[in-house]
Amino acid sequence: MVEIKVNLVQEKSYPCIEFVSDERFGKKFLKGFNFKIVEEDKNQKIYVSLMKDEMKLASKVLELIKNLKLSNVCIDVSKLKTKNLFLESLYLSAYEFDKYKTKKEEKEIRIGIYGMEKSEFIISKTISKAVYIARDLGNEPGNKLYPQAFVEKVYQIFEDEPNVLIEVLDEIQLEKEGLRGILLVGDSSVHKPRLL
């Protein structure tokens, strides 16, 4: 699994990925996804052509980082229109569910994001974390994440969040509330239904 650790940085570090929209490298450079590695003042800069679809751009940049075998890189997002969408897409492009794989490749990539407001960064990171949680839960097999196990997992996820109130209805409360549809579906399982 490739784990990406993303932090907001105030100064650029190198190697640094910068996006270009001018014709600095010619018209052909700006068609599709292209990059050029340049040494400037002993600093390695990786110029990447801007794309209209910044979500796709993020996945291509992550692919580039992996292919170049970079373990520590800075990305200057100051020229992007939707910095938050780019960052969320970068996170989500790195998602892997390998919990049940026997052979796991452990690798860490550190990414410094330059040119983004702290509040935007925090929101994007929080959204990405929430999507990771939802994807992890959705990828669990049904024999591992049955209703009560799901409830316990949600309690575990939010145990340190003081502003989250979790209410769970068991089969008795579901009957009282007249939620027969959930009970009927739950009758076909060895595990009793729960409503979170």
Image (cartoon, rainbow, N blue to C red):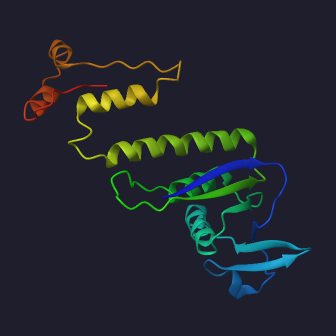
Q: Is the residue 63 above or below the residue 13 in the image? A: below
The residue sitting at the front extreme is 103
Tell me which residue sits at (38%, 29%) in the image: 154
Is residue 104 or residue 130 the one in the foreground? 104
Q: Is the residue 163 above or below the residue 48 in the image? A: above
Is residue 13 or residue 56 the one in the foreground? 13
Residue 74: quadrant of the picture: bottom right
Q: Position of residue 84 (x, y in %)?
A: 64, 50
In the drawing, does residue 112 fall left or right of residue 88?
Answer: right
The residue sitting at the top extreme is 176
In the drawing, does residue 171 fall left or right of residue 98?
Answer: left
Q: Position of residue 153 (x, y in %)?
A: 36, 31
Q: Quadrant of the C terminus?
A: top left
Tell me which residue sits at (30%, 32%) in the image: 150
In the drawing, does residue 51 fall left or right of residue 36?
Answer: left
Tell me which residue sits at (9%, 29%) in the image: 184
Tell me which residue sits at (43%, 60%) in the image: 104
In the drawing, does residue 27 fall left or right of residue 104?
Answer: right
Q: Is the residue 83 above or below the residue 189 in the image? A: below
Q: Is the residue 92 above or below the residue 181 in the image? A: below
Q: Position of residue 10 (x, y in %)?
A: 83, 49
Is residue 42 or residue 84 the one in the foreground? 42
Is residue 95 or residue 181 the one in the foreground? 95
Residue 38: quadrant of the picture: bottom right
Q: Position of residue 147 (x, y in %)?
A: 24, 31
